[in-house]
Amino acid sequence: MTRDEAWNLLCEYTASESLRKHALAVEAAMRHYAALGGADEHTWALAGLLHDFDYERWPEPPDHTREGARILRERALDEEIVGAILAHANWNLDEYPRDRPIRKTLFAVDELCGFITACALVRPGKLDGLEPKSVKKKMKTASFAASVSRDDIRDGAQLLDLELDDHIRNCVTALTQIAPQLGLD
């Protein structure tokens, strides 16, 4: 699947501008981590772009991810991508454990990208100058971006064997590369 085909699929199933921007943010973070680890950037980026494409139609577990996986398999998408998408959801871990770098990374960047976006939206400079210290301070405020799992953010950094500051810094760097697309410039 080309990147354009993946984008068109995302747009077919996802009307929400904020969900589309989240997909772009996760795509950027996955591409960044693939480059850091010498992995296939296209494969990792597609996993990021498509990880929640089915969410609007099937928001409840386990339909979310499983319905998307069915659609992606019908379109003959690489099983490495499908497995990563399934592994990013806790309800699929028995069958799709986070035992590969792409699976670990997709889980690790998903919630953090959403949280970083929320942090940037309330700052005058958006992503410019956003430091891990500021992100971690916001994490302590339960009412801020309340739907974002702080445990998943911390667990994701641990899965990647990174300090939380380094993981935050990596994701901010990735999102900064596409700030205009995210409305964060």
Image (tube, grey):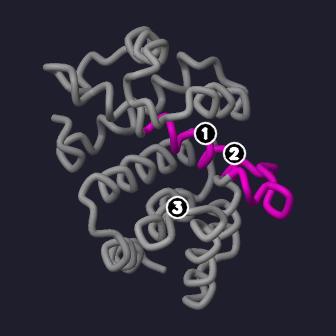
- Identify the amino acid type marked 1: Ala
Residue corresponding to mark 1:
108
Verify CB contact (< 8 Å) between mark 1 and mark 2: yes
In the image, 153 versus 76, the foreground residue is 153
> With respect to residue 47, does 36 lie above or below?
above
Residue corresponding to mark 3:
51
Residue corresponding to mark 2:
104
Is 73 displayed left or right of 23 in the figure?
right
Q: From this viewpoint, which residue is outermost toward the right?
A: 94
> With respect to residue 31, does 155 lie above or below?
above
Q: Residues within 10 Å of mark 2 (few under 14, many from 20)?
A: many
Q: Number of numbered discs present?
A: 3
Instruction: Name the residue: 46% across, 19% down.
Output: 142
- Label 3 to label 2, Cα distance in Å? 13 Å
Q: Image quadrant for the C terminus?
A: top left
Q: Earlier in the sequence, mark 3 or mark 1?
A: 3
The magenta stretch is 90-113
